[in-house]
Structure formats: structure tokens, C-alpha cells
Image: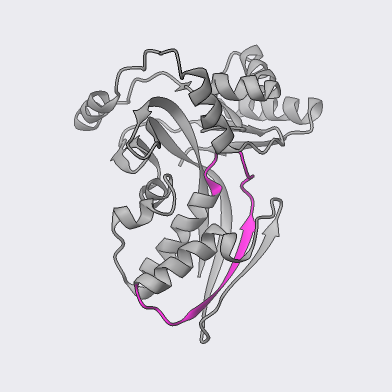
Amino acid sequence: MKYKAFAKINLYLEIVGTNKNGYHLLETIFQEISLFDELDFEIINDDKINISVSGDYPVPLGENNLIYKTIDLMKKNFKINKGINVKLKKNIPLGAGLGGGSSDAATSIKFFQDYFNIEIKPDFTASLGADVPFFLEGKRCFAAGIGENLLPIKNYNKKYIILVYPNINVNTTVIYKKFDEVYKNSLYISKKSLTDKIKKSNLLKTDLDFEYFNRLEEIAFFLFPELKIVKNRFKFFKLDSLMSGSGSSIFGITDDLEKANFIKKDFLTNTNYCVWVLEEI
């Protein structure tokens, strides 16, 4: 059974605090985009989990692989004594803030739901990664907490995304550690919650009015100055742009496909970055 595991971008990301376990509490808008990993699942008679990987971005195999962890957890929780072969074609770059690993995990859960006809509770999926519940919901969602409290955003005009991956693998833990260092003795005023705006937008069936924003940009740009250069190039084209998640990918947003392809060509001509023109799902 073949599946697509879509990437995501964050159209908005604010840090609003920490919980008792020290995890950062967020308010964010997730948006699925048309870049995807490809997964092919096959049930086998023995009890093994076999994963093979192809594509542009190799990932660890065996028990450290998130697909492996997800399948192993599903098999144990639901007492499934079948084995599984998984072929993964990895098209989503690593350390890019695109949620590729979480999307692969969510897609593995979807396979179990489809094949074995089982129901999965949200708290189970959140244990695999903060972004996993979103990827089970898909499209565009507002998320709060550590990402597990979701509110679908029903009305939005889909746009073209010029996605730039500058071949920098950013470790999320490093970004948040630096964030804590910077704000340990100083406060910032977090932006007003979008919850009421989103509920009103869904009720009235109108587009949500919000600012493209990512609180982690300044931290990532300090640690990886090259990322700011990418964003400034988007500014040259007078385009809204933003870093996704904790980086490293930067994306621009436009209604104009011709302009999107022109900007892609400019990046490819003048840099060695990976660049895609994509659509919002």
C-alpha cells in the first residue's frame, strides 16, 4: 500500500511559555505543502520490521528510525503479530523545519488504521512527536500547547510556496536551548492569541487575517547567518517570506506562479541550494 507523507511549513509561530516538564508551549499555524516522502507498506508473515530507504536524504535505519519506532509501538499496543516491510523514498530534507520525520510517523499510523481498522487516540500520537497529531489532521491547522491541541482552519486561499533549503541541517534542540539563554533574564511581549480570530473565521467562512511571524527566526539567524541572507533575497523580490519551524528552510509566498518559477530559477542560478515551487494543500 502506497502513501504520500506531506511536508509542512509554519505560517506563524510564537513561544508562549513552558509546561511543568520544561517543554516550550507554542501557538502556531501549520500548513501542509505538496513536497512529500513516499512510503510503501507490505505485510509479511514473520514478526520483523524491515525498512529500506532511497532518495536524496538518507535517514538512520533500525530502532532509531521514527517509522520503526511508530510501527513497533503500534504492534505492541494493538498486539499485532505480523511483520512489515517499508520502502521509504526520502524527498523531504532533514533538519529543515518541515516535519518530515513526524509526517512519516503519522503516515505509518494511517496505514495501520486503514489495514487493521483500528482507532488511534490523540494522546497516543502525541507521544511520537509534537507534530504527529497535525499530520493526521492535515491541511491547515492552528496548534497550541506543544502542538497537540489542534483547531482546523477551514477557509483559506491556497498560494504558491517557493521553498529554499540551504543545505543546513538545524538541530531543533540547539535552537530552543539558545532561545532559553537569550530570554532567561529578559522578557518579550508575546503576540495576542489567534484562537478567537480563527473561531470567528471558521464561523463566518472568511479568510483568517494574521501576520506571517516566527519567534525563532532571530535565534536561528544569529546561529546561522546564511539563513538571513536567504530571507533578504526574498525581500529583494518584495515577497512575504518566513523560516519554517526551527529552520533551516525559508519559504516565500505568492499568488503568481510565473513569479514563483522566476524566483526559483534565480536561486538555482546563484546558489547551490535546493529549491522547489510548491502548492499549499
Of all residues, the one furthest to the bottom in this rendering is 45
Whole-percent x and y of residue 162?
60, 31
Residue at the image point whose x is 58% and y is 28% from the top = 251
Give x and y (percent) for residue 224: 67, 25
Asked whether residue 199 appears in the rendered view, the answer is yes
Please tell me in which quadrant of the rendered image residue 140 appears.
Answer: top left
Q: Which residue is located at x 26 percent, y 23 percent?
A: 197
- Measured as percent of width and height from the top left, residue 148 is found at 34, 43
Q: Main SS type for the magenta part?
A: loop
> Which residues are drawn in magenta?
78-100
Residue visible at 58% across and 33% down? Answer: 174
Q: Give the colour scheme shown.
A: one colour
Q: State whether residue 92 is above or below residue 240.
A: below
Q: Nearer the viewer, residue 123 or 155?
A: 123
Q: Quadrant of the C terminus?
A: top left
Magenta highlight on residue 269: no
Does the magenta-highlighted stretch encompass residue 82? yes
Residue 254 visible at all: no
Residue 38 in which image quadrant? bottom right
Closest to the observer, 180 or 25: 180
Q: Quadrant of residue 189?
A: top left
Task: Give the tally of numbered discs.
Answer: 0
**Is residue 143 depicted above or below 192 in this figure?**
below
Classify residue 127 as left or right of residue 202. right
Q: Residue furthest front?
A: 185
Residue 72 located left or right of residue 170 = left
Q: Position of residue 246 (x, y in %)?
A: 54, 32
